């Protein structure tokens, strides 16, 4: 059921975004690439969900689905201290860029 909800919502958003991109292109406005980007952004989950749903019925789509998913790999450990350290340093840098001009 959730796969169909994703297909319906992302399909509607994709079609609406590409239609708005087409209208912007016809009117010569500057929002053409913005709406085309939104259409691609919503189109990727739409295409992948359609392939997932129909891969059980078609041999060709099953092969495409296996290419997308790939071979399973073992789980690898991610050092969280490195990511947290980078986030803390970035936060300190952003706060320093905001606070230092206020006081100096």
Image (spheres, rainbow, N blue to C red):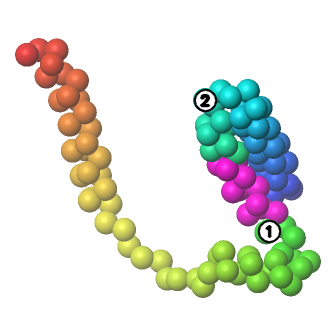
Q: Is 44 a magenta residue? A: yes
Horizontally, is 97 left or right of 74 in the view? left
- Position above or below: 32 against 74: above
User: What is the secondary structure assignment of the residue under circle 2?
Assistant: loop
- Position above or below: 52 against 64: above
Horizontally, is 40 left or right of 55 in the view? left
Q: Residues within 10 Å of mark 1 (few under 14, many from 20)?
A: some
Residue at image point 73% right, 27% down:
27
- Badge 2 is on which residue? 30
Residue at image point 20% right, 28% down:
97
Residue span colored magenta: 40-50
Image-quadrant location for residue 93: top left
Q: Is residue 31 visible?
A: yes
Q: Residues within 10 Å of mark 2 (few under 14, many from 20)?
A: few
Which of label 2 and label 1 is nearer to you?
Answer: 2
Image-quadrant location for residue 26: top right
- Quarter in which the N terminus is drawn: bottom right
Q: Nearer the viewer, residue 4 or 27?
A: 27
- Badge 1 is on which residue? 51
Q: Which numbered tag is attached to residue 29?
A: none
Q: Position of residue 19 (x, y in %)?
A: 80, 38
């Amino acid at each position: 059921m959730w796969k169909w909800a994703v297909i319906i919502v992302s399909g509607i958003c994709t079609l609406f975004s590409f239609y708005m991109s087409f209208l912007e292109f016809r009117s010569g406005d500057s929002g053409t690439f913005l709406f085309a980007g939104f259409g691609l952004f919503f189109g990727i989950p739409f295409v992948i969900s359609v392939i997932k749903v129909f891969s059980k019925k078609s041999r060709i789509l099953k092969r495409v689905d296996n290419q997308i998913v790939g071979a399973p790999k073992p789980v690898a450990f991610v050092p969280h201290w490195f990511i947290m350290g980078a986030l803390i340093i970035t936060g300190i840098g952003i706060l320093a860029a905001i606070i230092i001009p206020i006081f100096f």
